[in-house]
Image (cartoon, grey):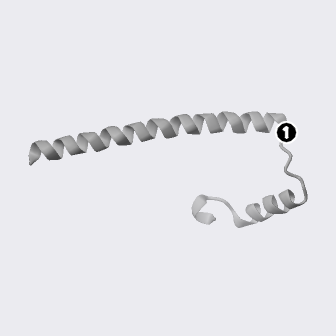
Amino acid sequence: MQNLGVNPNLISRWKRKFDEGGSEVNPEQLATLRAELKDLRKENKRLKMEREILKKAAAFFIKESG
């Protein structure tokens, strides 16, 4: 868990809270999480497009140099 930057104690606390039925999120937190998810999906899409462009550019330059 540490390679993800998450303290194992925090994971245990989340699990315990979930097991106790305390998985409720207030509306403000939910809105924040939804906005963050939307931003991350947008960034992920952009990064995938950039990766594809770089793959095509690399293939083009390999073809041209060979």
- At 22% from the left edge and 45% from the top edge, which residue is drawn? 59
Q: Position of residue 25 (x, y in %)?
A: 83, 43
Q: Which residue is mark 1?
A: 26
Q: Quadrant of residue 32?
A: top right
Which amino acid lies under the numbered mark 1 shown in the image of this protein?
Asn
Residue at image coords 86%, 46%: 24
41 lies above or below 3: above
30 relative to 58 in the view: left or right: right
**Which of the 4 image quadrants contains residue 36?**
top right
Image point (32%, 37%), residue name: 53
Indicate the secondary structure of the residue bearing disc 1.
loop
- Judge the density around disc 1: few (<14), some (14-19), many (≥20) Cα neighbours within 10 Å: few
Q: Residue at x 69, y 63 (%)?
A: 7
In the rendered structure, the answer to whether residue 10 lies left or right of residue 19 reads: left
Which quarter shows the N terminus? bottom right
Q: Position of residue 14 (x, y in %)?
A: 79, 58
Task: Please provide percent x and percent y for residue 54.
Answer: 31, 41
User: Measured from the top left, where is residue 29 in percent x and y?
Assistant: 78, 38
Question: Is 39 displayed left or right of 31 in the figure?
Answer: left
Residue placed farthest to the left in the image? 66
Residue closest to the eye, 26 or 6: 26
